[in-house]
Image (cartoon, helix red, strand yellow):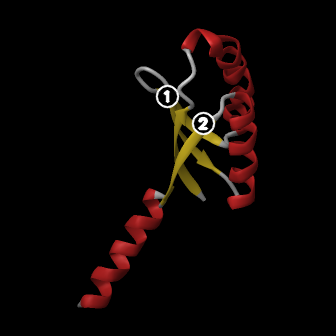
Amino acid sequence: MLFLVISNPRADRPSDMAAARQSFWPWMARYQASGICQHIYPRVGRGVVAVFKVDGNEVLHRILNEWADIIPAQFEVYPLVDLDATTALLVSQVAASK
């Protein structure tokens, strides 16, 4: 399952969160190395956008709880569809309409 996650950190002073922000990247590196975090980009100002590939909601739930323990934030979560699955669906829809 693919998910796009957008973090909106709590409005603390950036200097107050510098140490926590430094610890975030090594923590996230584990998920990148395992392939769970497919992409991650810092947002201008504050926050992060990431794409996770997980086996289920429980895994994503655990990751977001760990994340919020490091940097308190609200998360927008969007389920995504794999491009190959989308292509196969479109091919079957076209075939069914003929």
Residue at the front extreme?
Answer: 12
* Left or right position of 8 against 70: left
Residue 84 in percent (x, y) is at 45, 61
Q: Residue at x 51, y 29 (%)?
A: 47
Amino acid on which disc 2 is placed: Ala
* Left or right position of 86 against 25: left
Amino acid on which disc 1 is placed: Tyr
Residue at the top extreme?
Answer: 15
Eyeballing the image, is 62 above or below 21?
below
Query: Is residue 56 visible from the viewing direction of this image?
Result: no
* Left or right position of 74 against 20: left
Eyeballing the image, is 48 above or below 2?
above
Q: Which residue is mark 2?
A: 73
Q: Disc 2 and disc 1: Cα gap in Å? A: 16 Å
Query: Is residue 78 visible from the viewing direction of this image?
Result: yes
Quadrant where the C terminus lies? Answer: bottom left
Residue 31 in percent (x, y) is at 71, 36
Q: Residue at x 25, y 89 (%)?
A: 97
* Left or right position of 93 against 7: left
The image quarter in which residue 57 lies:
bottom right
Eyeballing the image, is 57 above or below 67?
below
The image quarter in which residue 91 lies:
bottom left
Which of the two labelled residues, at mark 2 and mark 1, occupies the earlier sequence position? 1
Q: Which residue is mark 1?
A: 41
Residue 65 in percent (x, y) is at 73, 43
Quadrant where the N terminus lies? Answer: bottom right
